[in-house]
Amino acid sequence: MGLFDKIKNKLDSGNDGGSPAGNYAFPPAQAPPPLEASLARYRRQRGINLGSWFVTESWLSTKLYASTAVDPKGSDFDLARGKDAKAAMEHHWDTWMTDDDWHWIKQRGFNSVRLPIGYYHLAGVLPDVLRGTDYERYADVYTGAWPRILGAIDKAAQFGLGVLVDFHAAAGAQNTDGHSGMSEGKVRFWDSNKNLASTSLALRFLASQLSPNPAVIGLEILNEPANNQRLQGWYESTLNEVRQVAEPEFPIYVSDSWATDHYAPWVGHRNDFVVLDHHLYRCFDGPDKQLNGYQHAGKLQHEFASTFLGQVGQARGNVVVGEWSAGLDESCLPHDTPAGERDAQKRAFVASQLQLFENTGGYFFWTLKTDRDWDSGWSARNCGQAEILPATVVLKKFNPPPDGARDTMCRQATDSHCNYWRQNNGNPNGHAFSSGFSRGWDDALLFLTSEGQNELGFVDQWARRRKWEYEHYSGPLGNEGWQYTDAFNQGVKACHSQALS
């Protein structure tokens, strides 16, 4: 009996034959794994997108589209309708990534990858996902995709890289771009219950299959959906469904749809591990096209940063920049600007972004590579060659903290905390505070001394777990719980102040 047969349990035989609806008996969510076994999910993600491997894009995989796609040659749907599409796609999946690529990612200091996939890539393992959708008649093209996706996750794990599986293309297309799986420039995701049922089934399957895998650092449930009044409600109902099969500390990433001010506080008020994904590009809008690289770098630091970091705070730090690049519009500089000067401006732009991202849960550069000869705005490998990306994205040097530093700084912080609240009619809990501070310091050091010199990125989410552990052994803290988590954050910062330069 195959995997599909094991999880499928159709109880509704009266279902219309064109919908992927029905009931599926996915295994129930398990208890969260121990924190010490979950470092990859809570560390600051220094990531890179593996764009155009499974969800392809015509400007990245130009040769594949030239040889296989039919007009308008803008999406996977046009490839699926091409001659010998199945053989072409399987050859592409088997050759796009090389061992040299994996080594390069690791050597550059990245610790994770973002892997965009579409619902149609589940054709072989979960055929009902395609029922009643645009891709149903082309399912055979994609039957070999799922084993290769699992192979990609295994390969990344061999290099110590975590994988964020990104649901990049949903039935009906959730945005107007070709990377949503269709080329017609229309959002039809909401138009049919079949599309919504397909997406629900796909996401429950993915969460059930991926959450037990320690190499998977999260699941992004929809890439760049066009924002509307239904989206937040869809997020909430989908999260409720997914949490039936994936424990609450399995990270679920949601797009902010470029409405960060709206979705940041929404994420911040959730108790489960939800991460907001913001995409930062400065080359598509008219005003952005007028600014050069130096101007964009300055604007990020002096204008955008304060607003964005405020939003990061509203989300309790659970924010990543899931896509960003060195890309600038060609018109931002005179056409005769020397290549070296263009690279210098991109270098300044990248450095400004990386500095900003140090205050978030991480980032994922778009993208690893293209098949074109040169693109130092969007190909990380070309950016590396041009020294636009630094030689390593590990920007700080680790030095073991001095002996006794933790205890000294913990005592000082605890005394300061208790004295302040005694003088201001508070109720300081010195034991909870000192315990939180020490645990924060020790955990920060745990990440820093792990392979690849990682940092604890989702500090508040991790601290909540530590508080629950503390309360399990020491009793409920009630309204004093904030003292533990605040001290934990202080301990992390204190450790970093002594160990990183």
Image (cartoon, rainbow, N blue to C red):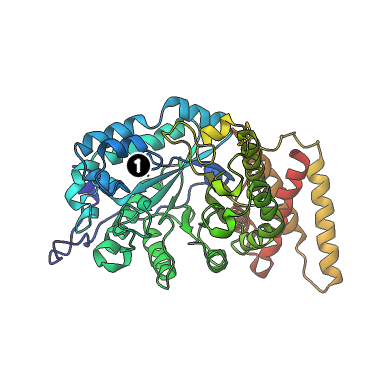
Quarter placement of the C terminus: top right
> Residue drawn at (60%, 33%), measured in percent from left and top?
452
Q: Quadrant of residue 54?
A: top left
Q: Could you tell me residue 91's position as x and y percent? A: 28, 31
The answer to whether residue 500 is seen in the rendering is yes
In the displayed structure image, the side of residue 187 where residue 314 appears, left or right? right
Residue at image coords 41%, 52%: 30
Q: Residue at 64% of width from left, 47% of height from top?
A: 293
Q: Looking at numbered disc 1 in the image, what kind of residue is underneath it?
A: Phe
| Camera sees residue 393 | no
Q: As displayed, is residue 477 above or below residue 362?
A: below
Of residue 404 and residue 501, the one placed in the foreground of this image is 501
Residue 119 sits above or below residue 424 on the image: above
Q: Which residue is mark 1?
A: 54
Q: Position of residue 358 (x, y in %)?
A: 65, 47
Is disc 1 surrounded by few (<14), some (14 to 19) or many (20+) residues within 10 Å?
many
Measured from the top left, where is residue 477 in percent x and y? 65, 65
Q: Position of residue 244 (x, y in %)?
A: 37, 60
Q: Horizontal placement of 401 versus 290: left or right?
A: right
